[in-house]
Amino acid sequence: MTDHQSSAPDLDSHQEGTPKHVAIIMDGNNRWAKSRGLKGVEGHKEGARAVKATVENCVRLGVEVLTVFAFSSENWRRPQDEVNALMELFLQSLADEVPELHDNGIRLVFIGDLSGFSDTLQSQMQASMDLTAKNEQMTFAVAVNYGGQWDIANAAQRLAQKAVAGELQVDDITPEALQEEICLSEFPPLDLMIRTGGEHRISNFLLWQVAYAELYFSELYWPDFDLTALQTAFDDYASRQRRFGRTGDQVEAELGDA
């Protein structure tokens, strides 16, 4: 990345047909490494480089929010040496990349149960969010120790606490009220979810937020998901008619009146 004052586009550069909010399940690091006779950690390192490139590409294309699934609540079940390597890589990436994200006007947000991490890592994550909190070029949301079911249950607990405290009635617990407590509620709705690695499932990622999002599955392993692959996903997204419960004729009529 270069300095955002000289080269990065303004938010007004959002291109027609480009999703405002993109989420990515970055799958295939281990298989990428295995196919090359390398250890799994090498795949994660290459995957980290793909993340950096994707952030840059999303800024160029006018995406407003990019959310990536970095570490799920289920990933703790992986071999301990792999988890340790992931945590070390995570710490190093924070130290290396956050200053550059900040210089380019990108806001960094972490979602998930951050209490599951070490005090050192929690402190670094909070410091990174504080440093970049006022940046407006793009928001980069990183889901760590995150699960969609946890997200919904956590939101429900918050509403229950308000009900117990007398701050709202049971009838006030609506989808709209729950939405306000869900992760990423302050950002534009999710438009497009991409999964790499050839699997066709969402693996407990953004279960609430994905309700009306478009889904795109790529056969590429995550380290191979480059600008061309991203643009292909965006072109596919732009070719779809998003109806949100309406008929195709209604959508076309509204577009004709616009």
Image (cartoon, grey):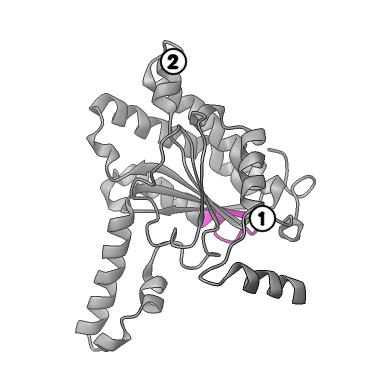
Task: Locate the C terminus and report the quarter of the image it occupies.
Answer: bottom right
> What residue lies at 38% left-to-right and 21% top-to-bottom?
40
Task: Locate the N terminus and report the quarter of the image it occupies.
Answer: top right
Q: Can residue 179 be seen in this view?
A: yes
Q: Can residue 168 be seen in this view?
A: no
Q: Kindly state the secondary structure of the residue where label 2 is placed.
A: loop
Residue 5's place in the image compared with 1, above or below, is: below
The tag on residue 183 is: none
Relative image position of residue 198 (x, y in whole percent): 45, 33
> What residue lies at 49% left-to-right and 28% top-to-bottom?
221
Query: Where does label 1 land, which residue?
Result: 137
Residue 169's place in the image compared with 233, above or below, is: below
> What residue lies at 38% left-to-right and 16% top-to-bottom?
39
How many angstroms separate mark 1 from mark 2 (CA)?
A: 37 Å
> What residue lies at 28% left-to-right and 46% top-to-bottom?
73
Range of magenta residues: 130-140
